[in-house]
Structures are given as structure tokens and as C-alpha cells.
Image (tube, helix red, strand yellow):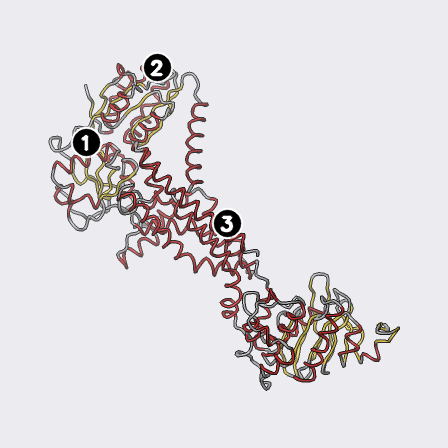
């Protein structure tokens, strides 16, 4: 494995980490609302959150391309006011990863919150705790294992993200080339042994992430 | 201290609750079969549930007034609540459980002394243990201590002895008596055991299918059939 | 990650299997470089009427098509955007040597968005700071990108510009990037620029500075109906086809 290949692995890892960190606060809070509250239109929110999970990734990528491109609603705003280019930069990589792995984080966290007995929260309330204190001292600590497991799964998904990424970030060596995109283009160019080396790395990373996540999910019930 | 229910109505699943009564004794029992709505009444008093209509007052001040749009949230009511499953925080030690409500209490009562509380309930040696390592009786006492250290104006106990075997019941009952004597905090006590009503309570409200069908002194309402077995005469 | 690979492979397998399954007598699979999309689509109906054969097209970057043929995809005819890809297949014995012809030539142009206000009359002006991103078909393998890199190397600008290059899947994707405004300029074939209303040609690469672009065609060895394939190949050199190619801006090899 050469230096450029390690760069690709490191870049992909770093971008996936950043994407997971960005969606974490929103995902956890949204998961709590989905677990504990109801409101008109809740099912629409649930469906929207689940969409990236079931839509073809390239379809999601196309939507991101239109929205984040220089002429798109979000992209134009950011380009004009912050001089930020999103499409074809590392920012697009993070955006694609964030969108695609968001549903997994929310799903795992929601299950974790639903497993915390509401009675515990009720008693905490009668003892004078504000809703924020109840969340920070009771709900969140008891749900943490499931939340971490869900985050790991989201991270693994971000690592492997391909369809949306290649559409919206392209394949710019050293700048936006991720692990999976690199495997794809190696195959295209006939560099099979390079492709297989990177394949081995992605298998190891994915295996580790999912294995730890499963272990955490199981231990949650003890 | 008195709790007043004025025309409180609630439909919940198959239950149709309808209450019009005042509880103003030291220890009042809420007696009735399961499904009668006893736990729901506690939730209404604690502020964990909103009725469909009616007014709930504590010493004349409204806690819940549906028509008037008033609902004092549970955390501001200073009403202690020990649910049937105790709900000890599994990730916190006994000490942390007990101290949870102590600081932020909304109560205006004189503060309960932690030392005295732990002495009375005999839980001093348990402070650093985790809830899952405690016996049934120990958990029970820790749950009482946690609710009491917040110096509540009123304590709600949901079938505190129900899941204990007879010998344990006999051992915990004295603690409840001690709480009544040492801390003088009014208690509403849900139970389906006539024996506990007779032994512990000054007042009993009998609930059946969401309505209060009798309210008065245990001696008047419960007759002794034979030794240590009481039966409600209704 | 594994699931992604499984998905991609499953789709590829499915595509190959279903395309093989739908092959009937008289149907030709034509694998052609993306730059030939519009011209071939216009030529097709007349050929289908005249011969009674149906044409199924697969347009992509020539390197993708080469790879697919190497993996055994059921192509009858391959039209590449450069000789190098065809050489590779010929060496591997995957095309009928006698059928190979150099069919078309093309020119490179530099394009900018139709609403762009950039001044771009010479290659040196590509280095202006306002041009942050230049879209090219991937120079590592797609012919249009290889040609573009050759050109930029010839005029000594490759080193200065290579960090601004956004490589795309094929030449049409590079065009699309300029159309959408996600790239400030692009280098594509003149024939591509011709079909787009949303780009303007900033300037055309002169023949003496640009690389020699040559599109060869050949019958693929695994073809099930090489006679029909050869007939189509011949048709591509006929008066009717040549007229269409010229209309789109292709040059013709005689």
C-alpha cells in the first residue's frame, strides 16, 4: 500500500468521522423527539428521515447535486456569501456521507431511548428535575450504549458511501477520492490489484465497526 | 394538608375516572381491585397526567385546572412519588439516587435531615452500592429515602408492599410507621390489602371502576373476620 | 461497504444477464464512446429500417466499455474514442482485426457556461484566477481526458492547471458540469459542445496544437452475428451515415 493509498484511507476515515460528528447532535435530539413525543406530521418526519436508507444512493446524490451545486438553493447562498464551493470538494463528501448515514444514527438512538423506562423519567421529574436535567442525567446515560452502537453503524455506512458521493463530489485524486470511489476507478482502469488491496482495507474497517456495534447492542440488554 | 378533587374526569383505555372528594388525613389509603384507577389517581396528583376536565387543589391552591388552563408541572409540585416498581435509577449508586431530588426541591417544607432519614430507614451501609445488588427490602427503603430527602409536601406510594413476601412485609411495615411518626409527611397509599389499611391508615377511599364508592375510617369500613384477616364490608 | 460492493456487482451481473437474455436474432449490441451518443441515435432508425436489425446502444467512457468487453459483456460492435483502447482489446484478441477501421476524427474545444462572462481567447487565459475548476473527462483513462491532458502538456500548461482539474466519468459529464455551473470551464469535443445550448465555445484547439483524435470501430470477437455486425460497420461508412456524422461536427477518416 503506497502513500497515496494510505492518504485515501485516512481521508475517507476523517471525512466519515466528521460527518458522523456533525449529524450526532441533530440525530440524537430528533431520535428523542421521535421516541417520546407525538405531533401532527410526525409520520412525515419519520418517512423523510428513512428516505436515504431506501432510495437509490445515486438518486439521493442527484438531489444533493441540485441543491448544493453553485446554482442550487443552498449552494448558491453559500457560494455568494461565504465563497464556499460544496460540489466537487471535500465538503460534498461530508454532505453525502452525513445524509446517507443519518437514518442509521436516528434509528439506533430512537430504539435506545424507547428502551429507557418512562417511569424513571417521571420519578426524576417528581424529584424536581427540569426536562434538560432528566435528559442529561437519566435518559441519555441509560441510552448511551444504543446511541453509540447506532453511531458506529452510521460511521461504517459513511465509510462505504459511494453512489451519492461520486455524483456530488466526483473523483478528484487527493481531494475527494474516497475508498469506495477509488476501488471503482481502479477497476475501471484495470488496476485490479490496487482495487483488491483497498477492498481488503474496507472489509476490515467495516467488519470492525459492525462487530463492535453488535457487541454494544447485545450488552445493552444486560 | 388536603388534596381536593373537584369534578375530575378522565377516560383512559377502558377506565372512566370520575372523582369528587377531599383527602385531608395523615395517611390515606386508596383501596380497590386492580384496574380501578388507583395508579392513575396518583399520577394525576403528582402532575404526571392531565385529566380531561376538573380541578385538583392542594391546600386550596389549584395544581390542575383544565377549564382555567392551569397545570403545574410535576417538577414544581414537591409531591413525592414511589411507583410500584420503585424505579430506582439503575446507573446511579444508592447515594446518588437518594441525593437526586435533594437540592432542587421546590418544597417549602423544612428540610428532612439526611442523617436522620438514613438512620430511620437503616440504609447507612448501603450508600455506595448499586441498585441491582440490593435485596427487595433494601430497594424499597432506598426508594422511600429518595422520595423523602426531597422534603415533599405529600408522599404518594403505589402498592409499596405488594411485591414483597409476608416476612418482608412485616419488616417494612414498621419503617412506614416510623416515616409517619418521624417525618410527619402526609401520605396517600395505594393498596389492595385490607390488613395494611387497618394497620397503617387513618382514612380510606375505596375505588371501584374509576369511582369512589366509599370514604371513611378503616375501622368503620373494614371488619375483622378472623384473626389478622380483614374484609371490606362492602 | 460490503453491501455496497455486493449491490454494485449484483446490478452489473443483472444487467449483463438481462441484456444477454434479451438478445434475439437480428439485434446488435453497440458499445460506443459517449461522445457519439447523439450522432448514432440519429443514424439508428434509418439503419434499422433498411436492414431489419435492431440496435441496442451502450454509451459510456471508452475505458468503461473496454473493461466491460474484457469481462465478457455481450457486445457486437465497439466504437472507441481513441486508438489506444482498441489496441488493448486487439492485443487481448477480443476484436476481429480485419474489421477494424479508423472511422472518425474530432476536435477539442474549451467551453464555458452560456452565461459566463469570462474572457478566454487563448489557452494561457485558462490560468486566470477566476477559473477555479476545469472539468475534463478523467485524464487517467477516458480518451477525451487523455487528449485534453496531451493538449495542455503540449502548450506547457498542464502543471499549472492540474490542481484545478475536476475529473469526470466521461466527456458528457464534463460538459454537464460546465452547464450546471459547477465547473468554470471544460475541455470537451467540439461535437459535444455543438449539442449543448448551455455552453459556449471559448475557443477551438487548432489542429497543429491539438492531439490527433481518432475513433476506431471494430467487430467484437464474441459477437453472435458477426455478419450483421460487419454490415452495420459498413453502413457507418456509407453516404447516409457520413452526412449525419459531419452534421454533428465529426471529421471523417477516408
Q: Is residue B67 visible?
A: no
Q: Which residue is mark 1?
A: C107
Q: Position of residue C101 (x, y in %)?
A: 24, 19
Marks 2 & 3 on one chain: no
Q: Chain of mark 2?
A: C
- Quadrant of res C17: top left
Looking at the image, is A2 positioned above or below residue B55? above
**Disc 1 chain ID:** C
Dots 1, 2 in contact, CB < 8 A: no
Badge 3 marks a residue whose secondary structure is: helix
**Local SS, label 1:** loop
In the displayed structure, C250 sits above or below A152; it is above
Front of the two marks 1 and 2: 2
Quadrant (top left/top right/bottom left/bottom right) for the N terminus of chain C: top left
Residue B200, image x and y in percent?
Answer: 75, 78
- Give the total number of marks visible in the rendering: 3
Quadrant where the C terminus of chain C is found in the figure: top left
Q: Nearer the viewer, residue C19 or C245?
A: C19
How far is disc 1 from disc 3 in space, using C-alphas? 57 Å
Q: Which residue is mark 3?
A: A214
Label 2 SS: helix
Mark 2, residue position: C226
Nearer to us of marks 2 and 3 is: 3
The residue at 26%/44% (across/down) is A3
Left or right of residue C102, residue B71 in this image: right
Side (left or right) of B193 relative to A140: right
Amino acid at each position: 500500500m503506497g502513500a497515496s493509498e494510505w492518504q485515501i484511507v485516512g481521508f475517507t476515515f476523517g471525512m466519515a468521522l466528521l460527518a458522523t460528528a456533525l449529524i450526532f447532535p441533530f440525530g440524537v435530539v430528533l431520535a428523542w423527539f421521535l421516541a417520546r413525543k407525538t405531533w401532527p406530521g410526525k409520520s412525515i418526519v419519520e418517512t423523510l428521515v428513512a428516505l436515504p436508507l431506501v432510495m437509490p444512493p445515486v438518486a439521493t446524490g442527484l438531489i444533493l447535486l441540485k441543491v448544493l451545486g453553485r446554482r442550487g438553493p443552498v449552494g448558491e447562498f453559500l457560494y455568494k456569501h461565504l465563497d464556499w464551493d460544496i460540489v466537487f470538494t471535500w465538503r460534498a463528501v461530508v454532505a453525502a456521507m452525513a445524509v446517507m448515514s443519518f437514518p442509521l444514527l436516528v434509528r439506533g438512538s430512537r430504539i435506545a431511548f424507547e428502551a429507557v423506562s418512562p417511569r424513571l423519567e417521571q420519578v426524576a421529574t417528581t424529584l424536581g428535575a427540569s426536562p434538560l436535567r432528566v435528559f442529561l442525567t437519566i435518559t441519555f446515560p441509560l441510552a448511551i450504549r444504543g446511541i453509540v452502537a447506532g453511531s458506529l453503524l452510521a460511521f461504517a455506512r459513511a465509510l462505504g458511501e459511494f453512489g451519492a458521493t461520486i455524483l456530488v463530489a466526483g473523483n478528484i485524486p487527493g481531494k475527494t477520492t474516497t475508498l469506495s470511489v477509488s476501488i471503482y476507478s481502479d477497476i475501471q482502469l484495470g488496476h485490479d490489484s490496487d482495487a483488491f488491496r483497498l477492498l481488503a482495507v474496507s472489509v476490515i474497517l467495516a467488519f470492525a465497526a459492525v462487530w463492535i456495534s453488535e457487541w454494544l447492542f447485545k450488552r445493552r440488554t444486560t | 394538608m388536603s388534596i381536593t378533587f373537584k369534578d375530575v374526569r378522565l377516560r383512559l383505555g377502558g377506565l372512566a375516572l370520575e372523582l369528587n372528594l377531599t383527602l385531608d388525613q395523615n395517611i390515606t389509603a386508596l383501596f380497590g381491585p386492580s384496574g380501578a384507577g388507583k395508579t392513575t389517581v396518583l399520577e394525576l396528583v403528582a402532575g404526571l397526567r392531565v385529566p380531561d376536565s376538573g380541578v385538583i387543589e392542594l391546600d386550596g391552591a389549584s395544581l390542575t385546572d383544565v377549564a382555567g388552563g392551569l397545570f403545574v408541572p410535576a417538577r414544581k409540585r414537591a409531591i413525592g412519588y414511589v411507583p410500584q416498581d420503585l424505579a430506582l435509577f439503575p446507573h446511579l449508586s444508592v447515594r446518588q439516587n437518594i441525593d437526586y431530588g435533594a437540592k432542587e426541591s421546590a418544597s417549602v417544607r423544612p428540610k428532612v435531615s439526611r442523617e436522620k432519614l438514613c438512620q430511620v430507614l437503616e440504609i447507612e451501609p448501603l450508600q455506595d452500592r448499586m441498585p441491582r445488588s440490593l435485596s427487595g427490602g433494601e430497594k424499597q427503603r432506598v426508594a422511600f429515602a429518595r422520595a423523602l430527602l426531597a422534603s415533599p409536601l405529600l408522599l404518594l406510594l403505589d402498592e409499596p408492599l405488594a411485591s414483597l413476601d409476608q416476612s418482608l412485609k412485616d419488616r417494612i411495615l414498621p419503617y412506614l410507621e416510623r416515616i409517619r411518626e418521624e417525618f410527619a409527611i402526609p401520605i396517600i397509599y395505594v393498596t389492595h390489602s385490607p390488613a395494611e389499611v387497618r394497620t397503617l391508615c387513618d382514612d380510606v377511599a375505596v375505588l371501584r371502576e374509576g369511582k369512589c364508592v366509599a370514604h371513611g375510617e378503616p375501622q368503620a369500613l373494614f371488619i375483622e373476620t378472623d384473626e389478622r384477616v380483614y374484609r371490606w364490608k362492602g | 461497504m460490503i453491501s455496497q460492493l455486493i449491490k454494485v456487482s449484483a446490478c452489473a451481473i443483472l444487467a449483463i444477464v438481462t441484456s444477454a437474455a434479451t438478445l434475439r436474432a437480428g439485434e446488435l449490441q453497440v458499445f460506443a464512446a459517449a461522445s457519439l451518443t447523439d450522432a448514432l441515435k440519429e443514424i439508428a432508425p434509418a439503419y434499422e429500417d433498411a436492414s431489419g436489425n435492431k440496435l441496442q446502444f451502450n454509451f459510456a467512457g471508452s475505458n468503461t466499455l473496454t473493461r466491460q468487453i474484457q469481462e465478457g459483456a455481450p457486445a457486437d460492435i465497439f466504437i472507441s474514442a481513441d486508438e489506444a483502447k482498441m489496441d488493448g482489446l486487439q492485443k487481448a484478441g477480443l476484436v476481429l482485426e480485419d474489421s477494424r477501421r479508423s472511422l472518425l476524427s474530432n476536435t477539442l474545444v474549451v467551453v464555458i457556461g452560456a452565461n459566463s462572462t469570462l474572457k478566454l481567447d487563448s489557452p494561457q487565459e485558462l490560468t486566470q484566477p477566476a477559473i477555479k475548476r476545469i472539468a475534463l473527462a478523467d485524464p487517467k483513462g477516458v480518451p477525451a481526458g487523455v487528449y485534453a491532458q496531451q493538449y495542455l502538456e503540449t502548450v506547457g500548461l498542464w502543471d499549472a492547471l492540474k490542481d484545478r482539474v475536476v475529473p469526470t466519468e466521461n466527456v458528457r459529464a464534463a460538459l454537464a458540469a460546465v452547464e450546471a455551473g459547477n465547473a468554470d470551464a471544460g475541455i470537451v469535443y467540439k461535437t459535444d459542445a455543438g449539442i449543448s445550448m448551455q455552453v459556449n465555445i471559448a475557443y477551438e484547439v487548432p489542429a497543429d496544437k491539438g492531439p490527433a483524435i481518432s475513433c476506431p470501430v471494430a467487430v467484437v470477437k464474441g459477437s453472435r452475428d458477426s455478419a450483421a455486425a460487419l454490415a452495420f460497420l459498413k453502413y457507418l461508412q456509407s453516404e447516409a451515415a457520413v452526412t449525419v456524422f459531419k452534421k454533428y461536427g465529426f471529421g471523417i477518416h477516408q
